[in-house]
Amino acid sequence: MLSQRTRYTIRALLHLADRYGEGPVQLAEIAEAQNLPAKFLTVILSQMRRDGLVETLRGREGGYWLARPPSEVSYGEIVRLTRGSLGLLPCASRLAHEPCRNCISEDKCRLHRAMLRVRDETARILDGLTLADHVEVEDIA
């Protein structure tokens, strides 16, 4: 299951993807449009800036924008940055591997092998999806 932080981050980044190339987007606009708490959004976007996904400009005309084109930001990258791992069990994590408590050895554990496959398939799918795949373009009529 995706954490609340991950879901909020994806929604905020999708909002920025929708406005890609239009200049800075103010925090209040993102918070209102996505129904996100502004304080939490500030923390999320600050982290995304440190991680290189978002750029910022302070001041009256300031705001946030994607540091890279939406087609270069995958859901897999976002999930890894906010959640840390795609593994559903500690023994299936690439980044935070730990043996499971009260388990048999990993080389004999059928659940471990299944979760490695789930992790790899999840990674393949999420790494293949980008923000550009879900950008909403406003109709100009």
Image (tube, grey):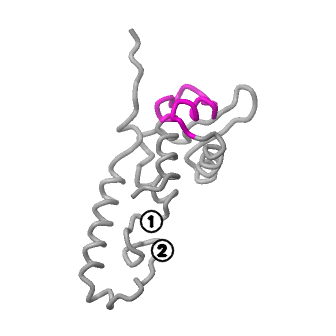
Kindly identify the amino acid type of the residue bearing the numbered disc 1: Ser
Point out the image quarter for the N terminus: bottom left
Q: Is residue 91 left or right of residue 24?
A: left
Q: Is residue 93 left or right of residue 110?
A: right
Q: Nearer the viewer, residue 79 or 1?
A: 1
Q: Nearer the viewer, residue 58 or 100?
A: 100
Instruction: Give the percent coordinates (x, y) of residue 14.
Output: 46, 38
Which residue is most to the top?
141
Give the residues in magenta: 15-36
Kindly identify the amino acid type of the residue bearing the numbered disc 2: Ala
- Crowding at label 2, few (<14), some or many (≥20) Cα neighbours within 10 Å? few
Instruction: Give the percent coordinates (x, y) of residue 8.
Output: 51, 46
Per the image, is 58 magenta?
no
Per the image, is 27 magenta?
yes
Disc 2/disc 1 C-alpha distance (Å)? 7 Å
Residue linked to disc 2: 96
Instruction: Give the percent coordinates (x, y) of residue 91.
Output: 39, 78
Dot 1 falls on a residue whose secondary structure is: loop
Q: Is residue 138 left or right of residue 111?
A: right
Q: Are marks 2 and 1 in contact (CB under 8 Å)?
A: yes
Residue drawn at point x = 45 percent, y = 46 percent:
73
Residue drawn at point x = 53 percent, y = 35 percent:
35
User: How many numbered callouts?
Assistant: 2
Which residue is most to the right?
59
Residue drawn at point x = 38 percent, y = 73 percent:
89
Residue drawn at point x = 33 percent, y = 66 percent:
119
Q: Of callouts 2 and 1, which one flags the residue occurring earlier in the amino acid sequence?
A: 1
Residue linked to disc 1: 85
Dot 2 falls on a residue whose secondary structure is: loop
Point out the image quarter for the C terminus: top left
- Crowding at label 1, few (<14), some or many (≥20) Cα neighbours within 10 Å? many
